[in-house]
Every structure is written in structure tokens, then in C-alpha cells.
Amino acid sequence: MVKAYVHDNNNSVDAREAHDTGVPVTLERLEKLGVIYKYLETQPDVESLAKERNYKNQDTVNIQLSTFGNDENLFQKKLAIFYEEHLHDDEEIRYCLEGTGYFDIRDSHNNEWIRCKVDPGDLLIVPAGIYHRFALDITNYIKALRLFKDEPKWEAINKSSSADESSTRKAYLQSIV
Ligand code: KMT
Ligand code: NI
């Protein structure tokens, strides 16, 4: 069930550890950042939400060592990509089907990372232009549904000065003031 807290920002510890400062984050605080975080019982509930919001595409990702042919190197590389701070040009939905993981959401008001722990049934709506990243937890497994509005906008745009200056980022910052 949904649980969010301030990340301790201790980068000398594995991303898959909890990194819990003990400071809870409310759903209202996340909503102020444009993030919707909630529990939905079934996949059809997710499909209808996606339809309402004009989503056209989806895929399922299975993130665990065996997906990568048990190649530990390749697995770590993939995890490192997910853990790079990035944004997308479109709103996206993430829904946890099995396993667990962490979505870290950057709070642009104070630069804190807000860590959202996802369990099966937990759903996040991540707005266009918000910086975020994803980590597995110590169980090393998640199966998640990723829902996208339009195909060309799936791409992850890593944090950089050009991403900071992009129209998507600017529009996002305008939307939360
Ligand atoms: C994202 O946008 O960060 C991702 O798609 C991460 C993988 S989904 C578990
Ligand atoms: Ni992303």
C-alpha cells in the first residue's frame, strides 16, 4: 500500500536499500508536485483510468536478473539507467503488478527526493517534465505496467541544462506554482 517519505540522499549506500529519513510525505504534498499516487485493486481499473486520460500505448516490464539472461553486468547497467534522474515529454502512468520498487520524485521546491514505495496495486501518475528515477528494492524484482500517451514521447531525457531549459520542464514548473 502507498507509502512515501523523504529520501536520505545517502548515495554511498545501495539505491535498493530503503533510504528512509523517517519523514513521511503526504499524498497532498505529492499532488502539489502534480503526482498522483494511489492504490487500484485491478488492472481493468487501471485501463479505464488510462482511457479517461487518453493513453494510447502500454507495455509490461519485468525487471529482475533472469530477464537479462542472468547477466549481472547487464542487469546493473539497466538499473543504473532507470536510476538516472530524468524526465519525459509526456505524462506517464506506472502500475505495480508484482514485486516491489521505489520511484523517487524530485521536489523542485526544496530539491528533496521523495521516495514512493510501490507494492502490487500501487499506481503513480508522473506528470510531463518532473524529474524522477526508479530503483528496485532488495528483493530485486518488479513487474510493472507502463502506460504512455504517445509513442515518440516515451524517451527518458536525463537531467541536464538543456532538459532544464526545455519547454516541457518550463511548463511543468509553471503548472506547480
Ligand atoms: C521510468 O519512467 O522511470 C521507468 O519506466 C522505470 C521503470 S518502470 C518500473
Ligand atoms: Ni521515467
Image: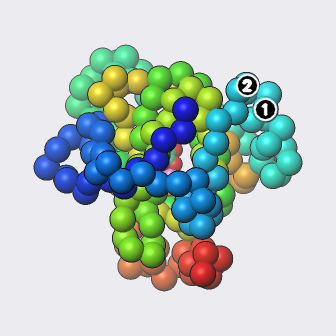
Type of amino acid at the residue the image marks with label 2: Thr
Residue 13: x percent and y percent?
Answer: 17, 44
Badge 1: how crowded within 10 Å, few (<14), some, or many (20+)? few
Q: Looking at the image, which residue is at 47% across and 23% down?
A: 99
Report if the CB atoms under discs 1 and 2 are less than 8 Å apart: yes
Query: Quarter of the image holding residue 171?
Result: bottom right
Left or right of 96, for residue 138: left
Q: Looking at the image, which residue is at 13% across and 49% down?
A: 12
Quarter of the rendering occupied by the N terminus: top right
Residue 50: x percent and y percent?
Answer: 78, 43
Badge 2: how crowded within 10 Å, few (<14), some, or many (20+)? few
Q: Which mark is residue 35?
A: none
Disc 1 is placed on an element classified as helix
Q: Please give the residue where the numbered disc 1 appears in the rendered image.
A: 45
Q: Is residue 86 shown above or below 108?
A: above
Q: Which mark is residue 42?
A: 2
Query: Quarter of the image holding residue 113?
Result: bottom left
Of residues 25 and 151, the one drawn nearer to the viewer in this rendering: 25
